[in-house]
Image (tube, rainbow, N blue to C red):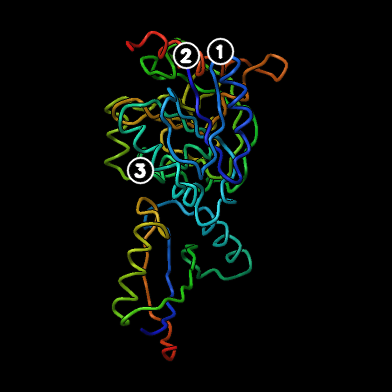
């Protein structure tokens, strides 16, 4: 078993109104960044997990997303491996 | 009518619901979220509040509480379940109702009275109202913007599952009467079989003239009457 650190990104689905992103978008425009065309706000969740392999760690995190971490109605998710620590 | 009021850590309308149920002659009990079993109850109420501090998403953690397995079985067996505000969010997270409640479009927490139009009077929860009746009931939420995919939204309208809609003083579902950006001014919906209702406004806070409105009473008397006339 190895220890893995995973980064789970959860973001609002395309097309869904993201009022936070919109507010930040307006603020960036008013600060002078006229080129900012769109802003979406999601969240990142960091999970330390013991697993047999990187693949099984990722599979577990994806299952966590489907069950709890993301709402399939409004959010998409992506799981990435951050690092593999030495086996304890 | 034996009424279960489910209490999660962070629920804050559980006592209002308990009192509303008692006011119409119900026999209410609090059921803590870690308890199991709903045998003997006729109605299950999920209160408003901020269960688990709204961490992750409103209702997402509460939905995993032990008692929710029993609420799911109770609802699937046809038992009446009413979720108000955070209770509505929990019902959506649990999949007992379709869609999701996301951040209000103006990003503001809205706490004031709204007008609701009663769109269905053939449900367990609304039989004491007149079709098209306008109710004055408070809201208090930051995440009440009802969203779902297009297919679901069309099905809700086609099947007449929108029970309450935000309207103006003329009873029109106009944009200016919509406090949170909900699609088609949706304030409350039922599931396909009609035994699960979720709504963002708080009928349990509109039970006494002294507090500004008694328009919420009908939700509770409807349940009381529907259940006492139902065959045993």
Q: Nearer the viewer, mark 2 or mark 3?
A: 2
- Which residue bears the numbered disc 1? B25
Q: Do circles 1 and 2 both sit on a common chain?
A: yes
Q: Relative to B179, is A33 above or below? A: below
Q: Residue at x 59, y 18 (%)?
A: B22
Q: Do circles 2 and 3 both sit on a common chain?
A: yes
Alpha carbon distance from label 2 to label 3: 26 Å
Residue nearest the viewer, comparing B76 with B128? B76
Chain of the residue where label 3 is placed in the rendered structure:
B
- Which residue bears the numbered disc 3? B95
Q: Which mark is residue A25?
A: none
Element on which disc 3 rests: loop
Q: Relative to B41, is A40 above or below? A: below
Packing grade of label 2 (10 A; few <14, some 14-19, many >=20) is: many
Packing grade of label 1 (10 A; few <14, some 14-19, many >=20) is: some
The answer to which quarter of the image holds residue A71 is: bottom left
Which residue is most to the right? B210
**Which image quarter holds the C terminus of chain B?**
top left
Q: Residue at x 30, y 76 (%)?
A: A56
Element on which disc 1 rests: loop
Q: Nearer the viewer, mark 1 or mark 3?
A: 1
Mark 1–mark 2 CB contact (< 8 Å): yes
Alpha carbon distance from label 1 to label 2: 8 Å
Residue B46 horizontal/vertical position (percent): 50, 34
Q: Residue at x 35, y 40 (%)?
A: B98
- Which residue bears the numbered disc 2? B224
- Which comes before the other along the chain, label 2 or label 3? 3
Q: Is residue B8 visible?
A: yes
Q: Residue at x 33, y 25 (%)?
A: B194
């Amino acid at each position: 078993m190895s220890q893995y650190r995973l980064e789970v990104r959860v973001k609002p689905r395309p097309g869904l109104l993201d009022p936070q992103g919109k507010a930040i978008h307006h603020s960036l425009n008013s600060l002078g960044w006229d080129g900012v065309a769109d802003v979406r706000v999601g969240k990142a969740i960091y999970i330390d997990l013991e697993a047999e392999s990187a693949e099984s760690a990722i599979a577990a995190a994806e299952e966590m997303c489907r069950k709890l971490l993301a709402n399939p109605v409004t959010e998409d998710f992506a799981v990435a491996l951050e690092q593999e620590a030495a086996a304890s | 009518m034996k009424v279960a009021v489910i209490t999660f850590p962070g629920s804050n309308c559980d006592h209002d619901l308990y009192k509303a149920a008692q006011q119409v002659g119900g026999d209410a009990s609090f059921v803590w979220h870690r308890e199991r079993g709903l045998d003997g109850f006729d109605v299950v109420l999920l209160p408003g509040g901020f269960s688990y501090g709204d961490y992750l998403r409103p209702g997402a953690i509460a939905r995993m509480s032990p008692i929710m397995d029993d609420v799911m079985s109770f609802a699937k067996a046809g038992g009446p379940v009413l979720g108000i505000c955070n209770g509505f969010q929990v019902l959506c997270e649990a999949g007992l109702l379709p869609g999701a409640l996301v951040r209000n479009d103006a990003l503001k927490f809205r706490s004031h009275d709204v007008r609701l139009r009663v769109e269905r009077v053939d449900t367990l929860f609304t039989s004491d109202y007149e079709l098209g009746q306008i109710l004055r009931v408070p809201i208090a939420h930051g995440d009440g913007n009802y969203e779902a995919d297009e297919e679901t939204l069309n099905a809700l309208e086609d099947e007449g599952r929108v029970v309450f809609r935000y309207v103006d003083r003329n009873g029109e579902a106009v944009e200016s009467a919509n406090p949170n950006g909900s699609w088609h001014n949706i304030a409350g919906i039922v599931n396909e079989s009609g035994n699960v209702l979720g709504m963002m406004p708080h009928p349990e806070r509109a039970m006494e003239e002294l507090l500004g409105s008694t328009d919420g009473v009908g939700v509770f008397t409807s349940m009381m009457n529907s259940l006492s006339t139902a065959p045993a």
